[in-house]
Amino acid sequence: MIPDIRHAYNAAFTDDKYKAFLDYIGKEYNHVPYFRIAETPVFIPKALKEHLFRACDEICDVICRPDYKAMTENSLQKKYAVPNETEHPKFMVMDFGVTRKENGELWPMLIEAQGFPSLYYYQHLAAKAYRKFFDIPSDMDHLCDGLNEESYLELLRREIVGDEDPKQVILLEIEPWKQNTQIDFHATRHHLGIHVACVSEVYQRDNKVYYKDEHGKEIHVKRIYNRVIYDEFIHRKDLKTGFKFTRECDVHWVGHPNWFFRISKFMLPFITSQYAPRTWFLNQMDEIPPDLDQFVLKPLYSFSGTGVKLHIAKHDLDHVTDPGQYILQERVNYHPVIQTLDEPAKVELRMLMIWEEGTARPRIVNNLARLSKGEMIGVKYNKDKTWVGGSVGYFE
């Protein structure tokens, strides 16, 4: 998106450099990621960066409203609500599709927001790896708000571990060593020294939570860095666990599960912004837009685009059995703005945010990029394509 930098990068690219880059990532934590890593980072021009930051700020204005919890109370089913909800989310991410306006200006449009962690450690590794093997301008960085490597890693340590013994802090996930994104768990464990636990390993006695370490010693858990997609956990009836999210316990949630619901597609109808497409709850629409081909039908809670309908007609809406669990969102037309060695790629930028203890608002700290040459972002839309997949953005 910055022509001279893009041209220089593409001209200097070789398959051997790319292979060495992938080998380095795989060896850093002794794990080869299961997801595809793109051949290129994204170079984000200053004007687009300013729009991204302004967009995040406008959306945060909604989340920071004093009545936000009341607005989103219906996102929680009472039987699944987790006790001891924090006043605000710890982690937030916002996904933006990069579009181009009629005057040629690059413009970010919100796809969705999540009150849930992303790949905060892996993205830093990926950014370092691109810089190690490719020529990345020294005045461009993936980190934000004045952070450098030392202060970024210290921020994560402080917010996740706090003042506790790392042994008494766990990263909690469903079958973590089967997850496609487990490289982030390896990296988190490496940097923090915390235990990565499956929900089936953790148990509760009275109001305290425990796990057993590699020596079989019982460890009292004081903080949980929550990486469980709670909606997935609710539907995993096969998991046997001695720990119930809905039971009162004396533990500090680093990323409380309720925020997974509060900051989700559920919040999109409440956002009015030049950076957000028009969105409605399907059960609250007075009339159906005549140009339905310009809208997308989405379930409120789904993983990796499951259940999303791109090409819809009125009969698709009529056949929705529970319209209160769906939104109708104006289509965001990603523009292919990344020049590659063949066809250009579209890009979605995820802004990674942290809401630090004692502060009034969240801050942007890092980012994640995903490149696609298909109709949507995702593996099934990019089979047999190159210069697609996970990446990172460097800001001008």
Image (cartoon, rainbow, N blue to C red):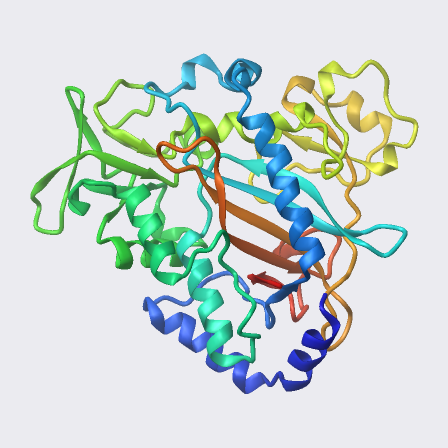
Residue at left offset 62%, top offset 83%? 13
Where residue 150 appears, as percent x and y from the top left, is 34, 60
Does residue 308 sit above or below 22 in this rendering?
A: above
> Could one spot residue 259 in this view of the protein?
yes
Task: Pick whichever, 332 or 90, lies toward us.
Answer: 90
Where residue 375 appears, as percent x and y from the top left, is 75, 53
Residue 89 position by quadrant: top left
Residue at left offset 25%, top offset 43%? 161
Q: How many marks?
A: 0
> Could one spot residue 381 in this view of the protein?
no
Residue 182 position by quadrant: bottom left
Residue 194 placement, left or right of 102? left
Does residue 101 sit above or below 134 in this rendering?
A: above
Where residue 9 appears, as percent x and y from the top left, is 64, 79
Does residue 65 sit above or below 303 in this rendering?
A: above
Does residue 138 sit above or below 292 in this rendering?
A: below
Residue at left offset 36%, top offset 41%? 174
Judged from this view, the residue extending furthest toward the right is 290
Residue 181 placement, left or right of 198? right
Where residue 104 appears, as percent x and y from the top left, is 86, 57
**The N terminus lies in which quarter of the figure?**
bottom right
Residue 80 placement, left or right of 350? left
**The C terminus lies in which quarter of the figure?**
bottom right
Residue at left offset 45%, top offset 69%? 128
